[in-house]
Image (cartoon, grey):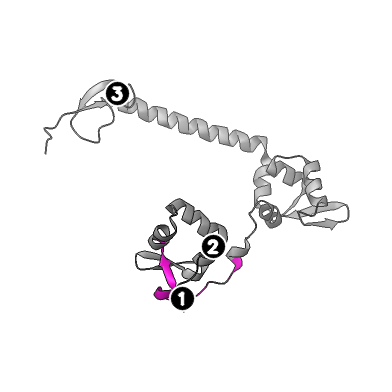
Amino acid sequence: MSSKIEIIRICEFCKNEFTARTTKTLYCSLKCSSRAYKSRTRQSKIAESNRQTQIAKNPDLEIVKTKDFISVNQASTLLGISRRTIYRIISRGELDVAKFGTRTVIRRCDLDGFFSLPLEESMLRPVQEFPGLSKCYTITQIQQKFGISPVGLYKLIQRHGIAKYSVGKFNYVAKKDINIIFNARDNEKD
């Protein structure tokens, strides 16, 4: 089936304007297509060669990545910081180590855990049960009642660690939590 459409395109390789017969044509000719393929192949070979060179420069780095326990020298190579900095982190008590005679060994999981974010108290709280529709506001009701923007409300809920409940297509927040934040009196009797 031949196409009768004519689309003006710009060749991805030579950047010249040409008339394409399909919507997926990228190159103006077979010559440009071949040259683009060769260029992509060449770039991938160069990138692979550079990666192999980096591995050859730092052969210990690949070995260190697989070990469960590493020395201070290996940790400094892995992180790209000095040995003295690692010893300072150890002396402050921020990193746990084991000593075998004069040799100091660091567990790889402790080193990875050193850079992870600590858990906040709000993440450690148990999940609250849904109090019921009559004891909750929708997000829109809160915005209208207290005159707050959607972004402001979102940040307020995040900052105070207030639980949100999704029921159907609506998000609900407990009235008592919102009333405490806005110092509003709960007019409804519970």
Q: Amino acid at mark 3?
A: Lys
Q: In the figure, 6 relative to 62: above or below?
A: above
In the picture, measured across the screen, residue 70 lies left or right of residue 5, that is right
In the picture of the structure, the residue carrying the numbered disc 1 is 131
Location of residue 4 in the rendering, given as x and y in whole percent from the top left corner: 11, 32
State the separation of the CA atoms marked 1 and 3: 69 Å
Disc 3, SS: helix
Q: Amino acid at mark 2?
A: Ile
Give the mark nearer the N terminus: 1 vs 3: 3
Viewer-proximal residue among 51 and 183: 183
Viewer-proximal residue among 40 and 18: 18
Report if residue 135 lies within the magenta region.
yes
Disc 2, SS: helix
Residue density around tag 2, few if under 14, some if 14–19, many if 20 or more, within 10 Å:
few
Nearer to us: label 1 or label 3: 1
The residue sitting at 41% across, 58% down in the picture is 143
State the separation of the CA atoms marked 3 and 2: 68 Å
- Asked if the residue at tag 3 contacts the one at tag 1, i.e. Cβ–Cβ closer than 8 Å, the answer is no
Disc 1, SS: loop
In the picture, measured across the screen, residue 87 lies left or right of residue 30, that is right
In the picture of the structure, the residue carrying the numbered disc 3 is 31
The residue sitting at 29% across, 25% down in the picture is 11
- Residue bounds of the magenta highlight: 124-139
The residue sitting at 67% across, 40% down in the picture is 59
In the picture of the structure, the residue carrying the numbered disc 2 is 181
Nearer to us: label 2 or label 1: 2
State the separation of the CA atoms marked 2 and 1: 18 Å
